[in-house]
Amino acid sequence: MPLLRGRGLIVAPTLVHAHDLTVEYGGTTILDRVSLSVTRGEIVTIVGPNGSGKSTLIRAILGGVTPGRGWVEKPRGLKIGYVPQRLVLDPTLPMTVERFLSLPRRVSKARAQDALERAGVPGIGKRQMSVLSGGQFQRALLARALLETPDLLILDEATAGLDQPGSAAFYRRIEEVRAETGCGVLMISHDLHVVMSASDRVVCLNGHVCCEGTPDVVAAAPDYRRLFGEGTKGALALYRHTHDHSHGHDHGHAHHEPADRDAAE
Ligand SMILES: Nc1ncnc2c1ncn2[C@@H]1O[C@H](COP(=O)(O)OP(=O)(O)OP(=O)(O)O)[C@@H](O)[C@H]1O
């Protein structure tokens, strides 16, 4: 999908645009006229309290929930890779990571290996899914989502259950995947510190879009402060601290990372 040029500007194409989505369950409005878009090469994170409709919004974008009002626009043939919050596998079922990547459609060993490398865990192909650490398991799910080299990567709390260094390493890999492939990323995260350092744009949801914008704009917004409290000042401070110079990719984010701890270890 090439970049569009118009009037001297280079405009990244929109990968998905949700227009005015309204979803009700049993007479309760879960999403109220929610609009959201993601362009190529952009990392957009949805934050919001428990039950604020984040997963419902992702499901509506993926097509698993039909909105009562509004619609979702995606370019024809858009390839989406999806990483769920968790996946429960029967621990008694013997299954290597390579075999897992071949379900439901068989992929060659070379493609499986390539996806594992891109997920940052090149050495786990022969291991049993049941013995992977939490971080490695989530990387295996990421590898599965990367098999088709998606245009848009969607992650629903993919780091739930990982500790802070584990989720920071995971999100760093997501940024690297974005830089390598130019894909767009839409994710849900509760890890505000990581969100603030890893996102280009944050959408704060509470049934409706309370506020959205760059991480510093959202962290300073009264609605966001009301939902997440003054404790989130720390997240903003971290964001400012870690973004005080450009490191050259399209989004101009800088990173003074804590000591890396790769999930492959
Ligand atoms: N299939 C369903 N039928 C009825 N109610 C549902 C259904 N799916 C979600 N809900 C309700 O919709 C609300 C929003 O749920 P959703 O999972 O989208 O929230 P969330 O922001 O992702 O929450 P969390 O942060 O806890 O994962 C909740 O009150 C939930 O109980």
Image (tube, rainbow, N blue to C red):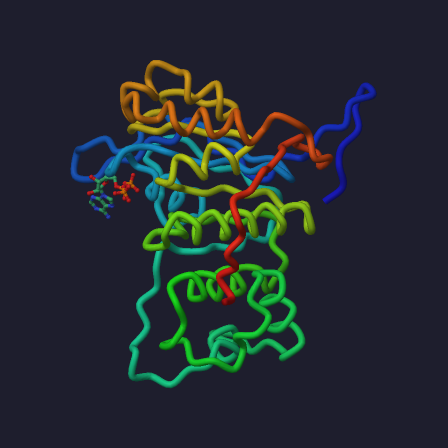
Query: Front-most of 195 and 39?
Result: 195
Q: Position of residue 15 (x, y in %)?
A: 59, 40
Q: Is residue 119 left or right of residue 10?
A: left
Residue drawn at 30 percent across, 35 percent down: 23
Does residue 194 sit above or below 135 in this rendering? above
What residue is rendered at 41% in x and 76% in y? 129
- Residue at 52 percent across and 35 percent down: it is 199
Above or below, 90 relative to 202: below
User: What is the x, y in percent for residue 181?
Assistant: 68, 50
Position of the N terminus by quadrant: top right
User: In this view of the protein, which residue sits in the foreground, 9 or 219?
Assistant: 219
Front-lying residue, 194 or 74: 194
In the visual, does 58 lie left or right of 102?
A: left
Residue lying at the far front in this picture: please name it. Answer: 259
Measured as percent of width and height from the top left, residue 58 is found at 40, 43
Outermost residue to the right? 8
**Quadrant assignment, res 28:** top left
Tell me: 194 left or right of 27: right
**106 lies above or below 203:** below
